[in-house]
Image: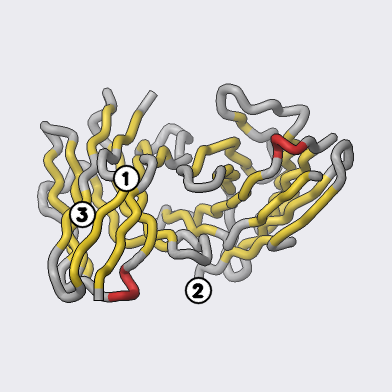
Amino acid sequence: GAVVSQHPSWVICKSGTSVKIECRSLDFQATTMFWYRQFPKQSLMLMATSNEGSKATYEQGVEKDKFLINHASLTLSTLTVTSAHPEDSSFYICSAKRGAPYNEQFFGPGTRLTVL
Amino acid sequence: AQTVTQSQPEMSVQEAETVTLSCTYDTSESDYYLFWYKQPPSRQMILVIRQEAYKQQNATENRFSVNFQKAAKSFSLKISDSQLGDAAMYFCAYRSRGGGADGLTFGKGTHLIIQP
């Protein structure tokens, strides 16, 4: 149990276009999901915390208008990179928090975004 | 804000030997969680072990154990009987307990090489 999927696993887009990445908890309900960004050979940086039915909380320095997060259901959160530019190219990873008594976070396999 | 420091960018160990990965952190909180995650080349984050700060006993999971020194804010990972499959990036991570700030703060990672 506790499987988290991401779609797509990789995407290539042209500069100026928008890209949507989905994160789904397949076998549990996740009231909270998290989005991380990982540059090559670097660590994961928390971008935002997404709570079902409410606005996402963004970390300092993360542009909320560029990285739109929607958490419309207990099993789905989406990250939309708007007007993507080459510097947005990165590996995006989501995690979903399973509630009590586990309070554990489970990671998706990640999405590699390349902006040309 | 919390910070996590991993001072060893890369470690190498002979198969079947024991290796210890270092992690220190800085926080003003008294209750929190600490984790070690493994990231193989597939980029899937895998939880290795977790420690709750209020527990004095060091966590153990089969060949993996931690040395948690709360006063020193140190959280090292010991891998016994190293196996080729242990080769990966290892990230130390911190998470607040409660208060809604459940996102993980990661260290920069240690690349573990297993020599056959």
Q: Position of residue B102 (x, y in %)?
A: 45, 40
Q: Position of residue B64 (x, y in %)?
A: 21, 65
Q: Residues within 10 Å of mark 1 (few under 14, many from 20)?
A: few
Q: Chain of mark 1?
A: B
**Numbered circle sitting on residue B9:** 1
The image quadrant of residue B80 is: bottom left
Q: Position of residue A47 (x, y in %)?
A: 58, 36
Q: Residues within 10 Å of mark 3 (few under 14, many from 20)?
A: many
Q: Is residue B50 left or right of residue A76?
A: left
Rendered view: A16 above or below A106: above
Q: Residues within 10 Å of mark 2 (few under 14, many from 20)?
A: few
| SS at circle 2 | loop
Q: Is residue B62 left or right of residue B40?
A: left
**Numbered circle sitting on residue B77:** 3
Amino acid under label 2?
A: Gly
Q: Chain of mark 3?
A: B
The image quadrant of residue B60 is: bottom left
Looking at marks 1 and 3 on the same chain, the residue that comes earlier in the sequence is marked by 1
Q: Position of residue B18 (x, y in %)?
A: 13, 65
| SS at circle 3 | strand
Q: Chain of mark 2?
A: A
| SS at circle 1 | loop
Which residue matches tag 2? A1
**Numbered circle sitting on residue A106:** none
Q: CA distance from mark 1 to mark 3?
A: 14 Å
In this rendering, the label closer to the viewer, 2 or 1:
1
Nearer to me, B85 or B66: B85
Q: CA distance from mark 2 to mark 1?
A: 33 Å
Q: How many marks?
A: 3
